[in-house]
Amino acid sequence: MDAFFEEGSLVAILTTQPLDRTLDYKAPAGGCFQGAYVEVPLGPRKIMGVVWGPGKGDFDISRVRSVNRVLDVTPMQGELRDFLCRAGDYTLTPMSAMLRLATRAPGLSEAPSLRKIYRLGIGEPDRMTDPRRRVLEVLRDMGGLSLTLGELAEAAGVTSSVIKGLVKQGAVSEEEAPRDTAFARLDPDYGGKALTDDQETAAQVLRAAIASGRYGTTLLKGVTGSGKTEVYLEAVAATLRKGRQALVLLPEIALTAEFLTRVEARFGARPAEWHSGVTMTERRRVWKQVSQGGAQLVVGARSALFLPFRDLGLTIVDEEHDTSYKQEEGVLYNARDMAVLRASIGAGQVVLASATPSLESWANADAGKYRRLNLTSRFGASVMPEMRAIDMRGQDLPSNRWVSPALAAQVRARLEQGEQAMLFINRRGYAPVTICRACGHQVGCPHCDARMVEHRFLQRLVCHQCGETTPKPAACPECHAEDKLAAVGPGVERLAEEAAELFPEARLAVLSSDLFGSARALKDEIEKIARGGADIIIGTQLVAKGHNFPLLTLVGVIDSDLGLQGSDLRAAERTFQLMRQVAGRAGRAEKPGTALMQTYQPEHPVIRAILSGDEENFWKAEAEERRAAGMPPYGRLAAVILSSTEAQEAFDLGNAMARQDAPLRKIGAQIYGPAPAPIARVRGRHRVRLLVKAAKGVALQPALSAWAAQFRLRGELRMAIDIDPQSFF
C-alpha cells in the first residue's frame, strides 16, 4: 500500500519540468497518497506533478509552498514508478523526461465541463471558401471521430474563428466532451477460431505461462502467414479471463485498422487504441480508463508501454525485430526491451512475435533466457513462396531502367492470370539524387549534409533527415544552368513511372508513407488493394509489415543489394529480415507465390541464406561473427552524439572526452572517435559521434554517467547518450 501524507507534511513532487531533482511541497488539505497526480505552483505558473515520496526537508520550511490540489485521476501505481526509475537508469534519461512519457494525455488537470469537441454537422455553409472546405474535409476524413478546437484548427491549417463560423451555420457541431466512459467489455470466449496442431500447442504453452502469474518472455517465431496472431490472441483471451490487462504493440499505424477488425471478430468489441492518429479527446479517455481498468486491451504504438495500466498481465510485441520500436529522438529507448523490463517488475508475460526475429531475441532464446515457440507451416492451404534470384549481370537493361526483362515477363504472366504482382524498392520518393548535368552539383539540404530527394508526385524536393521541402528549381542553384537538373537513381515513384510504361493496361497502386495525408487514407488504399483494386503494387518498406493481399502471387525485389552496402553492424541481419518479410507477402491464399530478387551479388552469403531459407544457419553464422568481435548481443555498445551550431566546438568536446576516459577505462571499455556522423549536419547542427564498446557483463551506465559528468555543456553544445544504438547515422 502506498504511503499517505497528512496535510502539511513534506512531500517530494516529480514534475515534467527539465529539473534534475524532485521539489518539496506541503501536502494539501485532506492529505494525499504517494503516486497522486497533483497541481503545484512553480514560480507564477501552475504545473502538474506526481507525489514521489516524502520530502527531503533540505530547504527553509517556511518558504515551502503547498500543493494546490490533488487531481481527480487514479494515482500512479508503485509498479509504474519503479518502471520509470529503472528505464531512466538504463537509458540515462532524466526522470522529468521519463514522467513526460507517462503523462501524454492532454487536459488531465481540466474539469470535463471545460472541454468542447467538434464533429461534422448537418448544415451547409452559406458560401464555401478554401479554409472552410479544409475544415469539412478533415472532419469527413476522420469518419465521425470528434476533435478538439485546437486539433481541428491545426489539422485544417485554419484559425479557430473559421471553425466557430461553421458552428454558427450548423456545418460543424460543437458538443460537450463526453465523460471518460469505460470501453465495451471484451469476451474471451466470443469468437475463437479452430487452431492447427502446432498453433494449439503454442497456445497451450502461453495459457500455462499466463496461469502461473509469474514473469516470462516467449519468442513466438513463425513463418509469414503461419497464424502467429491467432496464437497470441489466445494468450490475450487467457489474460482477460484472469482479470488482467493486455497490450499489443504494432510497429506501424497502418497495421492498426486491419488488426482492430480481427480483434473485434475475436472478442466481440473493439479494444482501446493509442497512437499518433488518435484524437486528444480519445487519448485522454484511453489514459484514464487504462488506469481504472476500464480498458482491458490496448492496441498501440511504442509509447503505449508507458500508459498507467492497473494490472498489465501480457504484452505482445508484434514484428519484434522492427527498427521502429527504437525511439531515436528525445528519450532513446527500445520498446521491445522496455516491454520485457516492465513485465519483469509487474509479474507479466511478454510475447515477442516475428517471422524473422532480431539477433538479440534469437540469442536470448538460444541461451534459455526466453522460451521459444515455433510455427513452421502456413495456415490453411497456403504454402511458403518459392524464392529465386535474378542475376542482373546477365540481364540486358538500359541505364535508366530497373525492372529486368526476366521480372517483367513474370509480372505479365501474373496479370494474364488475373493475379497481383508487387514491385518492392526500399527508397521513398522519385530519385535519391538530383544532379546538374552541366556542373555536377548535387542538390543538398540547406540545413543538413544530406541530398534532397525528388518527390515527383508532390513536385518538390524533400530532405529525409529534417523534413525541409522546396519546389524543384528550374535552374541549377550552383551554375544557374537551366533545364540541366537530372534525377539519378530509382525511388518508388520512378519505379511506378517505369511500371506504367511497361504495363500500360495494369492498374497501379503506390504504397509509400509520403503519399498519404492520414492513417485513414492509407488504410482505405490497403483495403482496396486487398479486394483486388490494383494489379501491380509498388511499395517501400511499408508493404513488408503484416499486410495480407490474398490475390498477390509474385513479389519482385528491385534492388536486393541496397542494404548490404555500408558498414552498419546490422546490415546483413536487416537485409535478411526485410527480404524474407517482403517475400512473405506472396502466396498467402490458395495460389502459390514466387519471390524474385534482382541482385548483382547472387553469391553473397546473405543473398544465399535468403534464397535457401536456412534461417538457423544464417543466425548461427551471424551470431559467431558478432561473438568474435564482441559486438551486441555478445558485447555492449553506447553511442555519444555531440552537436552544436559550430562544428569545431563539437569536435573539441569530443576530443576532450576521448582523452579524459578514466571512468570507462576502469571497466575495460574502449572509445572510438570522435568522428563526424555519416550525416554530419542535421537541422543546421553539426554532429560528432563517439562509440563506447564494453564487455557484456560490465556496469556500463554508471561508468558513462561518471564520464559525462566531467564535462560542462555551454552555449549551443548538446550531448545525447544512446544505450544499445540501432542507427549509426
Image (cartoon, rainbow, N blue to C red):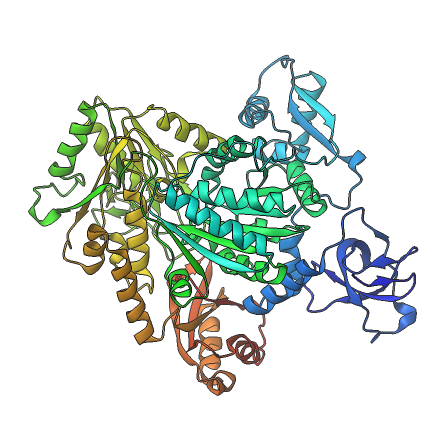
| Residue 96 visible within the image | yes
Q: Is residue 727 above or below residue 692?
A: above
Based on the displayed image, in which of its 4 quarters is residue 330 positioned?
bottom right
Residue positioned 49% across, 58% down in the render: 217
Residue 627 versus residue 333 in the image, above or below: below
479 shown above or below 500? below
User: Position of 664 compared to 81: left or right?
Assistant: left
Quarter the N terminus occupies: bottom right
Can residue 518 be seen in the rendering of this structure? no
Residue 139 is left or right of residue 35, and the answer is left
In the figure, 607 relative to 55: above or below?
A: above
Q: Assign the C terminus to one quadrant of the image.
A: bottom left
Residue 208 position within the rendered picture, expressed as x and y whole percent measured from the top left: 53, 52
Residue 624, picture quadrant: bottom left
Q: Give how far across and how far down residue 76 sits, in percent.
A: 72, 55
- Of residues 507 and 359, the one nearer the viewer is 359
116 or 531: nearer the viewer = 531
Q: Residue 574, image x and y in percent?
A: 33, 55
| Position in image of residue 696 (x %, y %) | 44, 76
Q: How many marks?
A: 0
- Left or right: where 487 falls relative to 304: left
